[in-house]
Image: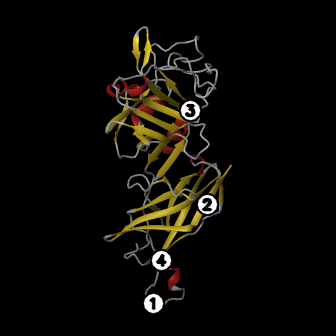
């Protein structure tokens, strides 16, 4: 298996109520419709109170992952954006993401700037106010190429996690230029009198939740002469765990299993040294040691644990993890009819710059 994450080179949100305001250095990205309480009366009538988010990842980062890490394997790309705050009145709503169809400047503005900063993208402009307008106010984007969407209910998790594989493939094949994603409410919600006010952590957040573009693919192999464990009564050990890793390169974590109480047989070596393998239905995960949140969750398609003649193992790309954080290794396995999750707080490491 493999999971690899990259982080944005730039992001911002744009607001119909402040059509020249730039927010490129704000700590949050807002996606909203506050028409119910905040319509803006103008000579042309009421202007919807709408905000949309723009997020772009480096083309070179995308190409490096696909060319040098994934290769010819099938992969999935997910856009993950983490909720900072939400006030929602409709029971159900949908967010959608589309590829932006032209270049834009991030700028250095914040929503709290007085006077407003106007040196980057905004509702009316791709770059500095007055220099290069969008063809259509609110941003130009392809709707006929490949978009993605996510439905939300009143009680559902409000974090964004969209499958954007098709858009990433278009960029990587140079079918369209990579100008990032625009994330917005569907038109039926944006133009209604509903109230959806959501904000998400941006690349400038001072938290551990910047937006991520996650790549997942299966690079596992399972070919071992070792006998697999057949009951839940076994001991698992990481044999090459280190306390720190630099945020470069890859590392194969070795995992050895043995029966807790092995059958006594006549042999010259200790039966406690007899290694066994985890079953083929075994998966790894990473948890943030401080927050307890899953950084890489168990996935039956993309976090399979491999096995060779020596032991089980799996690969972690250290440059795909955020540095200066502690990560706890976890294993999930199915033995017979039992599903076991093995987590030992001592099995952790730190990624350093």
Classify mark 1: residues with Cα within 10 Å, few (<14), some (14-19) or many (20+).
few
* Nearer to us: label 3 or label 4: 3
Residue at 66% x, 59% y is 244
Coordinates of residue 302 in the picture (x, y in percent):
42, 52
Query: In the figure, is residue 40 to the left or right of 253?
Result: left
Mark 4, residues whose alpha carbon is within 10 Å: few (<14), some, or many (≥20)?
many
The local crowd at label 2, few if under 14, some if 14 to 19, many if 20 or more residues have their Cα within 10 Å, is some
Q: Nearer the viewer, residue 26 or 105?
A: 26
Q: Residue at x 54, y 44 (%)?
A: 209
**Disc 3 vs disc 1: Cβ atoms closer than 8 Å?**
no
User: Answer yes or no: do the residues labelled 3 and 4 have beta carbons within 8 Å?
Assistant: no
Judged by depth in the image, the label closer to the viewer, 4 or 2, is 2
Q: Are marks 4 and 2 in contact (CB under 8 Å)?
A: no
Tag 1 secondary structure: loop
42, 95: nearer the viewer = 42
Front-lying residue, 41 or 154: 41
Q: Earlier in the sequence, mark 4 or mark 1?
A: 4
Vertical position of residue 194 compared to residue 154: above or below: above
**First in sequence: mark 3 vs mark 4:** 3
The earlier-in-sequence mark between 3 and 2 is 3
How many tags in the picture? Answer: 4
> Image quarter for residue 191?
top left
Q: Nearer the viewer, mark 4 or mark 1?
A: 4
Residue 258 image label: 4
Which circle marks residue 349 in the picture?
2
Please state the horizontal and vertical placement of residue 133, each as a whole percent of the image. 52, 13
């Amino acid at each position: 298996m493999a999971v690899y994450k990259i982080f944005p080179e730039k992001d911002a949100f744009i607001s119909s109520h402040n059509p020249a305001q730039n927010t490129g250095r704000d700590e949050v990205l807002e996606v909203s419709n506050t028409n119910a309480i905040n319509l803006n009366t103008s000579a042309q009538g009421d202007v919807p109170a709408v905000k949309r988010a723009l997020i772009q990842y480096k083309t070179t980062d995308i190409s490096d992952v696909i060319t040098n890490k994934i290769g010819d394997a099938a992969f999935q790309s997910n856009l993950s954006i983490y909720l900072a705050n939400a006030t929602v009145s409709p029971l159900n709503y949908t967010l959608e993401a589309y590829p932006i169809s032209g270049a834009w400047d991030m700028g250095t503005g914040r929503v709290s700037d007085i006077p407003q900063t106007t040196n980057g993208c905004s509702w009316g402009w791709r770059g500095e106010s007055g220099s290069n307008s969008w063809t259509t106010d609110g941003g130009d984007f392809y709707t006929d190429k490949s978009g993605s969407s996510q439905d939300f209910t009143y009680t559902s998790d409000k974090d964004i996690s969209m499958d954007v594989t098709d858009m990433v493939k278009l960029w990587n094949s140079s079918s369209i230029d990579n100008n990032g994603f625009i994330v917005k409410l569907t038109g039926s919600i944006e133009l209604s009198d509903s109230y959806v006010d959501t904000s998400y952590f941006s690349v400038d957040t001072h938290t551990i939740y910047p937006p991520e573009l996650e790549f997942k693919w299966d690079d596992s192999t399972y070919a071992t002469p070792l006998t697999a464990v057949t009951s839940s009564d076994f001991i698992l050990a990481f044999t090459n765990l280190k306390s720190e890793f630099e945020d470069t390169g890859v590392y194969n974590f070795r995992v050895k299993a043995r029966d807790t109480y092995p059958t006594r047989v006549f042999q010259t070596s200790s039966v406690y040294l007899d290694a066994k393998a985890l079953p083929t239905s075994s998966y790894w995960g990473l948890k943030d040691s401080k927050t307890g949140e899953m950084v890489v969750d168990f996935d039956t398609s993309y976090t399979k644990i491999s096995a060779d003649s020596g032991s089980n193992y799996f690969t972690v790309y250290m440059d795909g993890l955020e540095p200066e954080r502690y990560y706890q290794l976890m294993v999930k396995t199915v033995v017979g009819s039992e599903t076991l999750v093995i987590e030992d707080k001592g099995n952790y490491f730190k990624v350093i710059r």
